[in-house]
Image: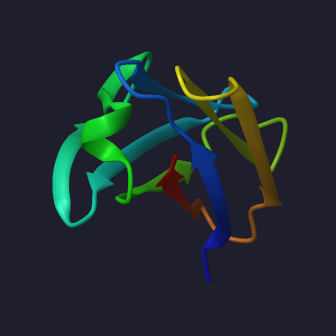
Amino acid sequence: MPTKLEEDYGVIENKVVQLTVIIGQGHYGSSTVKLNDENIFIGENIKDLDIGEGQDISGKTLSIRTKVTVTNPNTNLTSVSYVLKGGKEDETFDLEETATNKTVDYSASFNLIN
């Protein structure tokens, strides 16, 4: 079962919202990023990914699914930080889970609101 997060994120007209995904503990991770049901990014190394301007994305849902593979032999602890910038406040959302298998699935959903 994925580790889940669901939050509201306030956006501002004419300001671009950006997403960064940070995989912790030296493990490998890849993510799929969707705005409503449209894929806008699939891969790794997400840093300052432009999601869109506030007036264009308000009322939509930003969804991120991240799969973390345990590659650090020193720890089974995994973590993902989702960083959103450009809205009413810059915010970081942290999740962590101890892996019982080789992979952990994370899911984050942000309702983009005015």
Residue at point 41%, 18% (across, down): 15
In the rendered image, residue 24, in percent from the top left (x then y), is placed at 71, 31
Q: Nearer the viewer, residue 24 or 63?
A: 63
Q: Position of residue 109 (x, y in %)?
A: 52, 62
In the shown orientation, is residue 98 left or right of residue 17?
A: right
The image quadrant that residue 6 belongs to is bottom right
Q: Residue at x 34, y 19 (%)?
A: 14
Relative height, residue 41 to residue 32 (above, below) = above
- Towards the viewer: 55 or 62: 55
Q: Position of residue 78 (x, y in %)?
A: 74, 47
Determine if residue 43 is in view: no
The correct choice, above or below, for 36 with respect to 64 in the image is below
- Check the image and tell me how it is coloured: rainbow
Image coordinates for residue 1, horizontal then vertical, percent: 62, 83
User: Does residue 48 sit above or below 3 in this rendering?
Assistant: above
Q: Residue at x 44, y 24 (%)?
A: 18
Using the image as rendered, state which of residue 84 and residue 96 is in the foreground. Answer: 84
* Relative side of 94 to 34, left or right: right
In the displayed image of the protein, which residue is found farthest to the bottom?
A: 1
Where on the picture, by quarter, is residue 34?
Answer: bottom left
Q: How many marks?
A: 0
Q: Residue at image x 54%, y 49%?
A: 69
Q: Is residue 107 visible?
A: yes
